Image: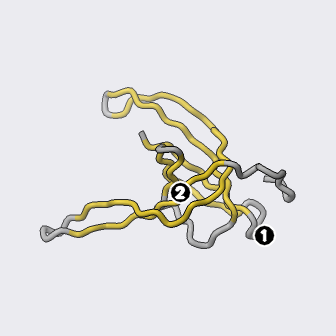
Amino acid sequence: MSPRAPIGALRHRVTLEAPVDAFDELGGFTRAFTSIAQLWARIETQSAGQGFVEQRLEESRRQLVTIRWRSDVTNQMRFDFRGRKLAIRGVADSDERRRFLLCQCEEIT
């Protein structure tokens, strides 16, 4: 993202979600996600494809999600965008000036 982002560049509303583990009496756990914040984002599709996973055809999409800089975003979180779940695979500060975060995401199907 350029140093001077054009007005409206962050035009998609997304929900940042963090994992919450609920432990049971047998030592296992169930993972759920809870909403952390509503954010404005820019979403760009990086690649799309198909492949076989365990003898089934699955689609994969990778998106680059740009948000305003936050210190609490990790690769354990995900975005909810219009009902689509985007798992964060990597987080980078775009220009090391704490203005924007670039999140490499994979759509969960």
Residue located 77% across and 50% down the image: 8
> What percent of the width, then of the height, locates residue 34?
41, 63
Near mark 2 (Cα within 10 A), the count class, few <14, some 14-19 or many ≥20, is many
Q: Circle 2 — which element?
A: strand
The residue beneath circle 2 is 15
Q: Looking at numbered disc 1 in the image, what kind of residue is underneath it?
A: Arg
The percent position of residue 31, horizontal first and vertical second, equals 31, 60
Identity of the residue drawn at 53% across and 47% down: 81
Q: Which mark is residue 97?
A: 1
Compared with 98, 77 (above or below) is above
Left or right, 54 with respect to 98, comes to left
SS at circle 1: loop
> Which quadrant holds residue 39?
bottom right
Tag 2: amino acid:
Thr
Display coloring: secondary structure
Q: CA distance from mark 2 to mark 1?
A: 24 Å
Mark toward the start of the polypeptide (2 vs 1): 2
For label 1, count other residues whose C-alpha is less than 10 Å away and answer few (under 14), some (14-19) or many (20+).
few
Query: Can you say which quadrant of the picture contains the C terminus?
Result: top left
| Nearer mark to the viewer, of 2 and 1 | 2
**In screen coordinates, is 104 left or right of 51?**
right
Q: How many marks?
A: 2
Q: Is residue 71 above or below residue 79?
A: below
Q: Position of residue 44 (x, y in %)?
A: 66, 42
